[in-house]
Amino acid sequence: MKNFIYSKLTGLILLAGVTLLSSCLKDDRYVDFGASKPIAELPISGLTNFSKDAFTEAGDTIVRQFAVNIASPSIPTTDTKVTLAVDNSVIAAYAKIDNSVSYVAMPANAFVFTDVSVTIAKGTRTKIVSVTIYKNKLDPSLSYMLPIVIKDASGTTISGNFGIHYYHVIGNHFAGVYKWDYLRYNNSSGTGTPTTDSKGQSATLSPVTPTQFEVASGYLGLRYEVTFTQNAGTYSNFAVAINADDAAALADGTLAGAKISISSPAEIVSVDPIAQKFIFKFKVHNNDNGSDRSLQDTYYK
């Protein structure tokens, strides 16, 4: 069994410190920072970070580390015991907010979460814990959620915005990590010697719904939005477009510092759903200097 360790431990610790001034200020229970009491939270969690809680890593076994943090005006002078739990009642509550994907509870044999009782020692703010899931125990056609919540914090206020990790797997056959080749031509024809010819990089096809995924292109990270239909394991009717928000940011100069329009919309060069290989292309025109670019991205297993 492959084992993929997803760990940004240093970043989490640094973020926990930043949270002292950021996430608490955003929390509706934490208005006056200077006069407020400590808050227990899970940095990089909550609805605003829902997409970051998707399990898209390669391999059958995924270990995801996350921080439990005490945000306060000063360093805690006493130990803080925080109780965590998997709370499947969150799934129904989430469905009332967004029902575009139908999630079911992750089966007990598909994950291990033992860090249910965490003690954050006095003089510190953060404790790193982990959860492990086994993707080979899941039905790839179903979407699962594994909500991990702060249940108790020994009297410390629990964050209203950052108290839940909505860990989830969207049942999308094509989601995951792919190899990636990128071609860029500094012309409108897409011929000749490419200015950029990058091969063997990696890219993640992130699930949006069971029949839609998105993936960044090599050109300024513009995202391809790919839709398809599925019927009894057969995949067809593939379509691709550049993410509308990305296209707008490109056109108004926000993204590149110059006003660039998509002169030829994204199109499919080829799709092989069995081999899981996708080739997309599009063209852009710089309205400030009149230059053209032809771009092509290939994603494959």
Image (spheres, rainbow, N blue to C red):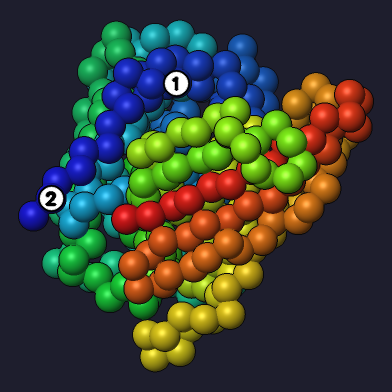
Q: Secondary structure at mark 1?
A: helix
Of callouts 2 and 1, the N-terminal one: 2
Q: Which residue sits at x=62%, y=37%?
A: 192
Residue 163 visible in the displayed image: no
Residue occupying the far bottom of the picture = 232
Horizontal side, residue 136 vs residue 298: left or right: left
Report x, y in % for residue 226: 58, 63
Q: Nearer the viewer, residue 10 or 1?
A: 1
Residue 160 percent across, percent down from the top left = 54, 42
Q: To which quarter of the image does residue 233 belong? A: bottom left
- Is 117 situated above or below 227? above
Q: Residues within 10 Å of mark 2 (few under 14, many from 20)?
A: few
Q: Which of 92/78 is in front? A: 92
Q: Amino acid at mark 1?
A: Leu
Q: Which numbered disc covers residue 15?
A: 1
Which three-letter amino acid code belongs to the residue tagged 2?
Lys
- On residue 2, the disc is 2
Which quarter of the figure has residue 195? top right
Q: Nearer the viewer, residue 256 or 5?
A: 256
Q: Image quadrant for the C terminus?
A: bottom left
Left or right: where 113 falls relative to 262: left
- In this rendering, the label closer to the viewer, 2 or 1: 2
